[in-house]
Image (cartoon, helix red, strand yellow):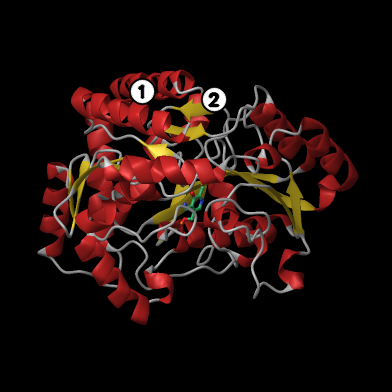
């Protein structure tokens, strides 16, 4: 089974280990939490990944979010190829940058102006500086279990890889960098109100994932986002939604559109680049104009607004706008999650499932997961066995319990049936 079917991957991973720390360029890809070695991918096509041994997998990672349309969507490939013919980077304005900015401003409720960067981390770094520069305040609120990239001051009780690996903070982050970071529990209304009552006038910004993906999927309790909106307005605090994962996924206008709550600023990533390295931050023009060269808050990037990346993003957003895949995608996702829940129930396994749109997590946890403390009690050993069993059956899941699974518009009913069938077998096996 597994290792002989993936012997080429195993062998080539040993080669990577010699020259790349841990063999990976991002720890979230390492199989540290589930055992074994990562599968080395050769190519993707639609809803499938193919490894270098020639195995095919139904992909529920989608490059950790970007591929809502599946891999190599023809419209996206066409635009990338067209851009490539004109050159790869100029370090001067292009029409493509304006075109993508216009699309983002049209689709995302809070965005009047937007700045392109190269990753979600860069967007997070930039919004913190922007909010602090704009307000003249230092303190920031973040929530335990939310991940905003590997920004020093936000790497406190962070989710995703940092949570998986049990290192809630990282060596190399000086105490001083995090001393203005206030970490609150997600969905804790009282703690939130108390914090604003005590030090509201010192808080530059509050940053959160409006639906969390990085401690597994966790939804905001009814009224939580509304309360945040009201408190931020009352205290002159910049409300930042990190929509790197949820943007263009939970609806074309992201979580802010889905929940009808408009932040002052939002961060974007993943889908906005359609698989190319793009991050962005945008919001109210008055705040965005604090950024250089209009204002004095500095932020820059040699490759920001890269034409190939912009072309990929434009094609992706245009395709989403034209085809509106969301209702169908959600229907498919619900059929899948209902299948998973019923398989887990039949196997008698303690579980809960959280979902929003095309993001979901099957938690090996009997309790509803509403925050970091509860998520930390997931049965990660059982998850590891689930993950490996699914992988052996050609289903590629995120390699950690503390991540969101992503569905794509390319998934067929057959793929979903196969996935449920595999889950029924694996969940029986590990019960
Ligand atoms: N914010 C959120 C909500 C994310 O999920 C991620 C990455 N998973 C980031 C920020 C960081 O983005 P990047 O990995 O592109 O730096």
Residue 369 falls in image quadrant: top right
* Marker count (numbered): 2
**Residue 416: x %, y % from top left:** 27, 26
Image side of residue 245 versus residue 239, left or right? left
Tag 2 residue: 260
Task: Identify the residue shown where x is 74% and y is 50%.
Answer: 183
Image side of residue 180 versus residue 129, left or right? right
**Does the closest atom of ligand 1 sit within 8 Å of the Cβ of label 2?**
no
Within-10-Å neighbours for mark 2: few <14, some 14–19, many 20+: few
Cβ atoms at labels 2 and 1 below 8 Å apart:
no
Residue 256 bears which disc, if any? none
Q: Is 206 located above or below residue 171 in the figure?
A: above
Residue 254 falls in image quadrant: top left
**Residue 211: x %, y % from top left:** 54, 35
Within-10-Å neighbours for mark 1: few <14, some 14–19, many 20+: many
Task: Identify the residue shown where x is 22% and y is 30%.
Answer: 415
Which of 243 and 32 lies nearest the eye of the viewer? 32
Task: Identify the residue shown where x is 63% and y is 67%.
Answer: 152
Element assignment for label 1: helix
Residue 51 falls in image quadrant: bottom left
Give the CA distance from mark 2 to mark 1: 19 Å
- Residue 414 appears in the rendering: yes
Task: Identify the residue shown where x is 52% and y is 56%.
Answer: 161
**Does the closest atom of ligand 1 sit within 8 Å of the Cβ of label 1?**
no
**Nearest to viewer (mark 2 / mark 1):** 1
Tag 1 residue: 330
Image side of residue 38 versus residue 290, left or right? left
**Residue 353: x %, y % from top left:** 51, 27
**Residue at the outermost right position:** 198
- Residue 250 appears in the rendering: no
Element assignment for label 2: loop
Mark closer to the chain start, 2 or 1 = 2
């Amino acid at each position: 089974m597994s290792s002989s079917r993936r012997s080429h991957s195993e062998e080539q991973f040993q080669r990577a280990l010699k020259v790349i720390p841990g063999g990976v360029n991002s720890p979230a890809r390492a199989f540290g939490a589930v055992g074994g070695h990562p599968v080395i991918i050769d190519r993707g096509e639609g809803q499938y990944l193919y490894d270098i041994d020639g195995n095919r997998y139904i992909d529920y990672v989608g490059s950790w979010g970007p591929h809502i349309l599946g891999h190599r969507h023809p419209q996206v490939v066409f635009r990338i190829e067209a851009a490539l013919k004109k050159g790869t980077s100029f370090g001067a304005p292009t029409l493509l940058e304006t075109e993508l900015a216009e699309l983002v401003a049209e689709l995302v409720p809070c965005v009047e102006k937007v700045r392109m960067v190269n990753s979600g981390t860069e967007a997070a770094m930039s919004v913190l500086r922007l909010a602090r520069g704009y307000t003249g305040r230092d303190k920031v609120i973040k929530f335990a279990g939310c991940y905003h990239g590997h920004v020093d001051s936000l790497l406190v009780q962070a989710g995703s890889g940092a949570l998986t690996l049990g290192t809630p903070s990282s060596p190399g982050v000086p105490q001083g960098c995090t001393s203005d970071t206030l970490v609150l529990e997600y969905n804790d209304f009282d703690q939130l109100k108390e914090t604003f009552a005590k030090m509201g006038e010192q808080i530059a910004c509050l940053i959160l994932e409006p639906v969390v993906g990085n401690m597994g999927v966790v939804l905001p309790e009814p009224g939580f986002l509304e309360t945040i909106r009201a408190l931020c307005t009352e205290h002159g605090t910049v409300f930042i939604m990190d929509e790197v994962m949820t943007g263009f996924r939970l609806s074309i206008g992201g979580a802010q559109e889905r929940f009808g709550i408009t932040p002052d600023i939002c961060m974007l990533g993943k889908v906005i680049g359609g698989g190319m390295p793009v991050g962005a931050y945008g919001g109210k023009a008055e705040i965005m104009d604090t950024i250089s060269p209009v204002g004095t808050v500095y932020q820059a990037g040699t490759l920001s607004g890269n034409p190939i990346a912009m072309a990929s993003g434009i094609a992706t957003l245009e395709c989403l706008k034209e085809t509106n895949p969301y209702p169908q995608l959600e229907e498919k996702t619900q059929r899948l999650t209902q299948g998973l829940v019923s398989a887990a129930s039949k196997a008698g396994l303690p579980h809960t499932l959280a979902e929003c749109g095309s993001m979901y997590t099957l938690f090996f946890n009997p309790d509803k997961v509403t925050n970091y403390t509860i998520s930390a009690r997931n049965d990660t050993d059982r998850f590891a066995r689930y993950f490996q069993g699914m992988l052996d059956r050609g289903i590629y899941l995120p390699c950690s319990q503390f991540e969101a699974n992503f569905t794509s518009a390319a998934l067929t009913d057959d793929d979903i049936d196969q996935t449920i069938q595999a889950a029924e077998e694996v969940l029986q096996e590990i019960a």
